[in-house]
Amino acid sequence: MDSSIGSTIFSPSQLELHGQRDYGFPFVDSSFLQKQTNIPAEFTWPKGDLVNSNGELSEPLVDLEGFFRGDELATQQAARIIKTACLSHGFFQVINHGVDSRLITAAHDHVDKFFKLPVSQKLKARKLPGKMWGYSGAHAERFASKLPWKETLSFGYDEKSLDPIVVNFFKSTIGNDFEQTGLIYQKYCEAMKGISLAIMELLAISLGIDRLHYRKFFEDGCSIMRCNYYPPCKEPGLALGTGPHCDPTSLTILHQDQVGGLEVFTNNRWKTVRPRHDALVINIGETFMALSNGKYKSCLHRAVVNRYKERKSLAFFLCPQGDKIVRPPPDLPCSQGNRMYPDFTWSELLEFTQKHYRADTATLENFTKWLKSSKPS
């Protein structure tokens, strides 16, 4: 997830420079990106962000079969592995997660179905300034520099909704022809929410608190689903698919295709995360870091681009209900000293990262300062 301080969007003259028709807001789609023989300045990143990766991340593999079977020994073992990962870089992969591989394949297939549409069709679902949901080409409706070499489609998932919220999003924005796409992603989000709550239970066990504490906290949340499409890039040494950032949300569940591209910054080096078709990549975000009183760390990560191949990924971001107070369990802070972060709501952090700040390693620190300055004493 990306946001920025002081970013400006393209002006009409800049849009004309890039040969884009003016749809009332700037856009950059994959057909435009793939026509570029040289990387436009707006898509180049600082050298410090482009340092090559150095080896593969040794993130642990967590087998969830025993947890779902109710095997207490296997559950404790899974919690121990997760704790080790979260004390260092906050990334791990899970297998035997119970999500049908055919559903995952279908979800990837429908990424193609949407992003291969003519731009006029994709723009029916365009993300408007200040809104969370919709189609975005390189986030050009928000930023003027360090643009990511990708297109995204984001939408919300709310388990409490009486209507199929994801299906309705696709039908209302793109049309009835995409009802099946909506059904696929509705099922995918339901599966990801189930995995998220299971991970939350294991995180609670790993921290030595009531095992249902976090599960209950997130049960009624409204989460975010994002489909990412990264077209080939002729100069991958200058551009990034997603720049270095930490997720402001609570938990991310990612399934990447076999092209790969996810990299994690740990021990002052970028490390690649090898794709596994049978696994889901998990990482904790800033909100959960606050819920653990800073014990578990949210980690800097990025996505690189490929010179020859397109890449796809599916990201599910677990979020609490917007007005819930984010604070650690009462028995956790006393074992670690003082509170590291003040009480806040997810909606406040979301506003900060969407309107005021581009997420990085200091998001929570700067959010805390912003929160104190924006609220009366």
Image (cartoon, grey):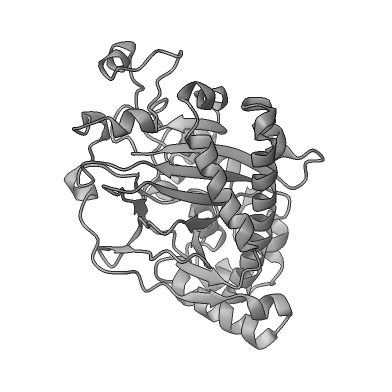
Q: Nearer the viewer, residue 297 or 233?
A: 233
| Residue at screen point 72% across, 68% down | 212
| Residue at screen point 22% across, 37% down | 44
Q: Is residue 181 left or right of residue 310?
A: right
Picture coordinates of residue 18, whole percent (x, y): 28, 20
Q: Nearer the viewer, residue 293 or 122?
A: 122
Picture coordinates of residue 233, whole percent (x, y): 27, 41
Q: Is residue 13 above or below residue 352?
A: above
Residue at the extreme bottom: 73
Q: Is residue 306 left or right of residue 161?
A: left
Picture coordinates of residue 133, whole percent (x, y): 57, 33
Q: Is residue 250 above or below residue 74?
A: above
Q: Is residue 133 left or right of residue 163?
A: left
| Residue at screen point 66% across, 31% down | 177
Picture coordinates of residue 2, whole percent (x, y): 42, 40
Q: Nearer the viewer, residue 173 or 324?
A: 173
Which quadrant of the figure contains the C terminus? top right
Image quadrant of residue 30?
top left
Which quadrant of the figure contains the N terminus? top left
Q: Is residue 243 left or right of residue 352?
A: left
| Residue at screen point 38% across, 14% down | 21
How many dots with numbers? 0
- Look at the image and tell me whether residue 323 can be seen: no
- Look at the image and tell me whether residue 162 can be seen: yes
Q: Nearer the viewer, residue 369 or 363?
A: 363
Image quadrant of residue 231?
top left
